[in-house]
Amino acid sequence: MKKIKEITTRLKIAKSKINNMEEKNSGSNAASLGKALKISTELVASVFVGSIMGFLLDSWFGTKPLLTICFFFIGVAAGIINVFRAAKKMNKNYKLD
Amino acid sequence: MALNPMHQFEVYKIGPEINLNGINLSFTNASLFMTISSLLILSLLFLGTKKKSLIPSKIQLVTEMSYTFVAKMINDTAGSSAKSFFPFIFTLFMFVLFCNMVGMLPYSFTVTSHIIVTFALATLVFIGVTIIGFIKHGFKYLELFVPKGVPIVLLPLIIVIEIISYLSRPVSLSVRLFANMMAGHTMMKVFGGFVISLGLLGGWLPLGFSVALTGLEMLVAFLQAYVFAILTCIYLNDALNLHH
């Protein structure tokens, strides 16, 4: 009888230890590396899309360099907003932990 | 030719040329390795679920782990309302993961190192998510482009910025996967070339680097599949629960 009780308490301790470890590992290294890789391309992609959009609009309206330049800068702004949002999301998650 | 680090990315056709109304539909090495990846996934899932024992065998364990991994990911990032999209995200994750991992084998071809493949996958996700958003919210979905609390004067600029930011999703999704895979495989090939050209005397250092890079590439291969799937979940979450 005593042995069974001992085993149950030991099991409880082991289980709580595993739970603790899982909670700590929820923001593991791999996930944060993934986030870092995500942010780096976010900035470039917006600039690229903005420039392409400006270029297409330019060839439609025949205002050759003007819209490309404008949309390049708007793309930069969009990229910065994207990175800012991603960072904000991360911060929120971090505080919740 | 063997030392050219970009030679591994060459697409060539296997078997006869198939031409359909001027569209080249020949079976290439890319199609071959996509088929191999799909067959590997199918056989893993088939073998893993064939004998459902309480104490799982190794293959059943792997299958169950991949299931719980994706299910947990969807639940954490997109909420329980996205549960019905599990099959799609699971397929996407497993396909990208297996394409990356099959590409790690010597003499194989990495399908995901071609931007057209990753861009097709990302565009599929992008169009799908947009359609889901419109079905779920109707024209209210366009509110995604109008953040709350913005002065009217700034609104035209903000809307253009938001539209560009929305359109950049498939580009960033595809470029990330493609660039990581291509850069990693090029680097491995370059270091492999150093081993041969430096010979028995000096080749040991790049050989060590090659081994380390292989480990790193394994991590990147898994990580990129994970990031691809998790971003799909995040976009799905944006479409299902409309708020910033």
Image (spheres, rainbow, N blue to C red):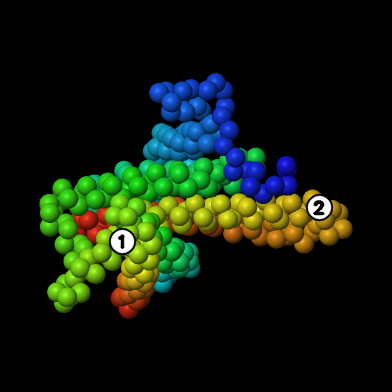
Residue B160 in sight in this render: yes
Residue B16 located left or right of residue B206: left
Q: What quarter of the picture does the C terminus of chain B occupy?
A: bottom left
The image's mark for residue B197 is 2
Dots 2 and 1 on the same chain: yes
> Residue A87 in the image: x percent, y percent?
36, 73
> Residue B76 in the image: x percent, y percent?
30, 61
> Residue B227 in the image: x percent, y percent?
42, 57
Foreground of the two, B128 or A65: A65
Foreground of the two, B232 or B94: B232
Please name the residue shown 82% across and 56% down the image. Answer: B198
Query: Within the image, what quadrant is residue B142 found in?
Result: bottom left
Q: What quarter of the picture does the N terminus of chain B occupy?
A: top right
Question: What amino acid does circle 1 point to?
Answer: Ile
Which residue matches tag 1? Answer: B164
Tell me if mark 2 has few (under 14), some (14-19) or many (20+) residues whose alpha carbon lies within 10 angstroms of its own.
few
Please name the residue shown 21% across and 48% down the image. Answer: B132
Above or below, comparing residue A11 to residue B17 in the picture: below
Above or below, comparing residue B153 to residue B230 in the picture: below
Q: Does the residue at mark 2 contact the one at mark 1 (Cβ under 8 Å)?
A: no
Given the image, what chain letter belongs to the residue carrying mark 2? Answer: B
Tell me if mark 1 has few (under 14), some (14-19) or many (20+) residues whose alpha carbon lies within 10 angstroms of its own.
many
The image's mark for residue B184 is none
Q: Secondary structure at mark 1?
A: helix
Please name the residue shown 56% across and 29% down the image. Answer: B13
Question: What amino acid does circle 2 point to?
Answer: Ser
Given the image, what chain letter belongs to the residue carrying mark 1? Answer: B
Above or below, comparing residue B46 to residue A84 in the picture: above
Distance from disc 2 to disc 1, alpha carbons, whole Å, reads 47 Å
Q: Earlier in the sequence, mark 2 or mark 1?
A: 1
Residue B221 located left or right of residue B64: right
Above or below, comparing residue A90 to residue B10 in the picture: below
